[in-house]
Amino acid sequence: SQQGEEDPQALSIQEGENATMNCSYKTSINNLQWYRQNSGRGLVHLILIRSNEREKHSGRLRVTLDTSKKSSSLLITASRAADTASYFCATDSGTSGSRLTFGEGTQLTVNP
Amino acid sequence: DTAVSQTPKYLVTQMGNDKSIKCEQNLGHDTMYWYKQDSKKFLKIMFSYNNKELIINETVPNRFSPKSPDKAHLNLHINSLELGDSAVYFCASSQGKGAGTFGSGTRLTVV
């Protein structure tokens, strides 16, 4: 069954605005990862946050994790047109190696 | 250098055929994966190999058979292709439970 659910499914903003995407999951996890996928391309890893971490930053990206609510959020600040892509959260609950279960993704459109 | 490379990038074939997709990673990772992305962009894990040993085998038709000749390679062979097999197949690798590095995908179209 699908682990992660994301909202919104689609988000359209203007350049310079912030974009927030949310992810909820159902079972205990080792870590949660966010990926970006440009149209017709492969997935690019953005951030990994472990289950004992609450917040992580990478450049314009900020990820939070609330294990009590089984939810995570990805914030992209000062968005650019090049940020237009699908964003997926993936939870890892594997015991050996990773066993990523992906959410449905959020399609972000940043208008110039 | 491409970290995770998979070939071919596009594959168009007729129902009933057998085809293979190859994947190689040059990152020294110990674990490799196959994921399937359907037309609605939903990604689902199919298989995972750790040092050539199968560790994840999701509910996938046995027409799909992964093969890992060494820890840098994980190939996917599909027998008797069906229309519903049409999807994008992604190979990925990771070091233990670290971040996954994905290939650029193989778009399989069964006609």
Image (cartoon, rainbow, N blue to C red):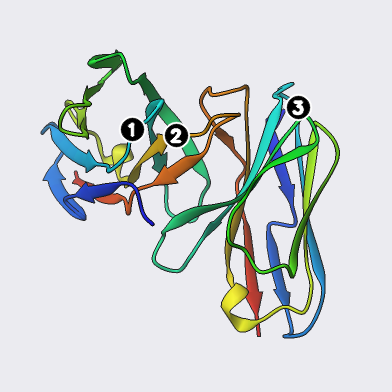
State yes or no: discs 2 and 1 in contact (Cβ < 8 Å). yes
Left or right for A6, reference B54:
left
State yes or no: discs 3 and 2 in contact (Cβ < 8 Å). no
Mark 3: amino acid: Asn
* Residue receiving disc 2: A93
State yes or no: discs 1 and 3 in contact (Cβ < 8 Å). no
Q: Which quadrant of the view contains residue B78? A: bottom right
* Secondary element at tag 3: loop
Q: Which quadrant of the view contains residue A48? A: top left
The percent coordinates of residue A6 (x first, y second) are: 23, 48
* Residue receiving disc 1: A28
Chain of the residue that carries numbered disc 3 in the rendered image: B
First in sequence, mark 2 or 1: give its number.
1
Chain of the residue that carries numbered disc 2 in the rendered image: A
Give the distance between the C-alpha atoms of the residues marked 3 and 2, in whole angstroms. Answer: 25 Å
State how many labels appear. Answer: 3
Mark 2: amino acid: Ser
Neighbor class of circle 1 (other Cα within 10 Å; few <14, some 14-19, many 20+) is few
Q: Residue at x 76, y 27 (%)?
A: B26
* Residue receiving disc 3: B26
Give the distance between the C-alpha atoms of the residues marked 2 and 1, in whole angstroms. Answer: 7 Å
Nearest to the observer: residue A59 or residue A31: A31
Are tags 2 and 1 found on a single chain? yes
